[in-house]
Amino acid sequence: MVAAGDAVLAAAVGKGRAHVTYGPGANPTIESRLEALEKNVTSIHEHISQTQKEMDEEFQKTADALKREEQSRQAEDRAIREKLEATGTGGVHISAIGALWLFVGVILSTAATELAELLK
């Protein structure tokens, strides 16, 4: 039996991968050819299963990252909306103080003649 193979190593990701091909050997018989084919099919099946598992893990990582980013953006949007509302209304307490001074100003502007009479 002869085994041939190739290997791929992704240094940036830190993962390695190897693929093995089984040959029937020198002077192959039908049985040795069948055995080599069975081993190759098993090897291919394992390779496909491993690739599917890796893809599922990567999809899950991506989905989790997207979910975290969505939640982060929603929180930031909420904070910006609250700041805009506060600056748009100027705050309720500032508006209340302005209304109080307006009320005092109107009273004092109409009471000028009465005050002048009172002080005589």
Image (cartoon, rainbow, N blue to C red):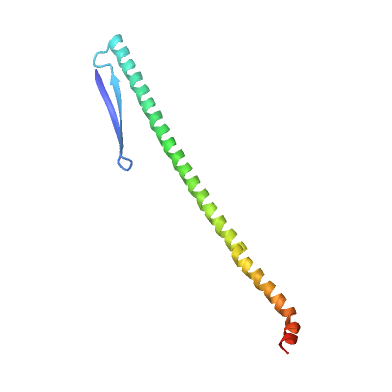
Q: Residue at x 63, y 66 (%)?
A: 96
On the picture, is 98 further left or further right than 67? right
* Residue 9 screen position, x and y as percent: 30, 37
On the picture, is 17 further left or further right than 97? left
Q: Is residue 36 above or below residue 5?
A: above
* Residue 93 screen position, x and y as percent: 59, 65
Q: Quadrant of the C terminus?
A: bottom right
Dividing the picture into quadrants, the one containing residue 105 is: bottom right
Q: Is residue 46 above or below residue 67?
A: above
Q: Quadrant of the N terminus?
A: top left
Q: Residue at x 71, y 87 (%)?
A: 119
* Residue 65 screen position, x and y as percent: 44, 42
On the picture, is 93 further left or further right than 19? right
- Which of these two is toward me, 120 or 103? 120
Q: Residue at x 54, y 52 (%)?
A: 78
Q: Residue at x 23, y 16 (%)?
A: 26
Q: Is residue 36 above or below residue 87?
A: above
